[in-house]
Amino acid sequence: MGGRGRFGQDGLSMVDVTHDGTPKWWPAENCCVCRTPTRFWFTPRDVALCPPCAETATESSLPTKTEWFAAERAHAPRTFVNYDLINELATARPPAMS
C-alpha cells in the first residue's frame, strides 16, 4: 500500500485515507461519495474515498462496502450481460422432435 494521510481543516470532519499504491495508468475506483476516480481508500470500510471528500466526511456518513457496490451498480448497470435472455433460455423447453 502507498502512503497514508489525514485531510481536512478540523479534527472533527476528516477521516484517514490510504493510497492504494497503484500506478497512474492503472484504472482507479470511483469515490464512494462523489464518484470521482481515486486511488485513495478508507480502509475500515474498504471503500474508495477521494481526499476532497475525506476532508468533510465522517465515518458514520460513509457507506459500507455493500452499499457502495450497490450504488455503483445502479449508476453503471452491466449491459454486456442480458440476464433476461439467459433466464429465458435456461427455462425454455427444447423443440419437440418429430
Image (cartoon, helix red, strand yellow):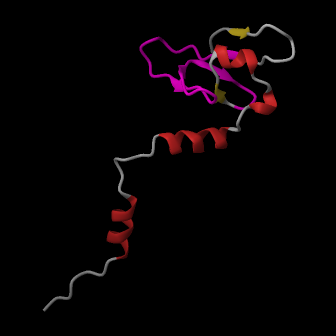
Horizontal and vertical percent position of residue 28: 50, 22
Query: From the image, which quarter does the N terminus lie in?
Result: top right
Name the residue located 67 percent from the left edge and 19 percent from the top edge.
53
Please say whether residue 28 is one of the residues in the magenta stretch: yes
Horizontal and vertical percent position of residue 6: 75, 10
Relative to 77, residue 10 above or below? above
Residue 39 lies in what quarter of the image?
Answer: top right
Name the residue located 46 percent from the left edge and 40 percent from the top edge.
76
Tell how many labels.
0
Question: What range is drawn magenta here?
Answer: 17-45
Relative to 49, residue 97 above or below? below
Horizontal and vertical percent position of residue 59: 79, 28
Residue 27 lies in what quarter of the image?
Answer: top left
Between 78 and 24, which is closer to the camera in this rendering?
78
The reply, left or right, for residue 32 in relation to residue 78 is right
Relative to 57, residue 87 above or below? below
The reply, left or right, for residue 98 in relation to residue 24 is left
Horizontal and vertical percent position of residue 30: 54, 27
